[in-house]
Image (cartoon, grey):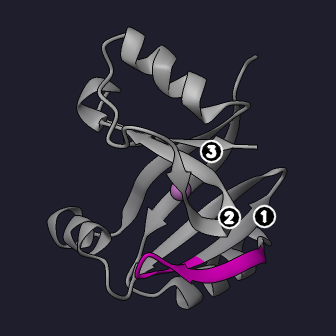
Amino acid sequence: MEPTFHHAGIATEDADALAALYRDTFGLTVAHTETFDGIYIVFLACGGSYFELLEPVDNDTVAGFLERQGRGVHHLALAVEDVESALYQARENGVEAIDDSPREGAWGHEVAFLHPRDTGGVLVEFVGH
Ligand code: CO
């Protein structure tokens, strides 16, 4: 089954400030917030998809991304029916997975990331639903 677009993950030093900016500028409202894996995360609803604002509190991966590349798009996430078989399909196509198997991600989702080197320079996340 064809995947659907789930969210764009955006690295920022201040997720609440960016959420307020996107609310005032684009009319996006907060759907969910949580701190997961040392990242303060704000999900903004956008027509069935989301913006996932990522503010590192105690997370070297996102903090390092901000240091190297500055604020901006960190990853794109596709909703798939079965993360395990999506991972299998990616590997069959020679795409390296960062996660060997699906793991728990933010908002209770099952997730797995693919290496951006093999996906056109884009960090891709599978989200189970
Ligand atoms: Co994400």
The magenta segment is: 30-41
Q: Nearer the viewer, mark 2 or mark 3?
A: 2
Q: Is residue 20 above or below residue 93?
A: below
In the picture, residue 39 is in which quadrant? bottom left
Image quadrant occupied by the N terminus: top right
Give residue 67's quadrant in the image: bottom left
**Which residue is farthest top?**
93
Q: Amino acid at mark 1?
A: Ala
Check if residue 42 falls in the magenta segment.
Answer: no
CA–CA distance between discs 3 and 1? 16 Å
Mark-to-mark CA distance, 2 and 3: 10 Å
Kindly identify the amino acid type of the residue bearing the numbered disc 3. Val
Beta carbon of the mark 3 residue lies under 8 A of ligand 1: yes
Q: Residue furthest right?
A: 47
Q: Is residue 88 left or right of residue 110?
A: left
Mark 1 or mark 2: which is in front? 2
Which of 111 and 43 lies nearest the eye of the viewer? 111
Estimate the spatial distance between the alpha carbons at disc 1 and disc 2, rounded to whole Å: 17 Å
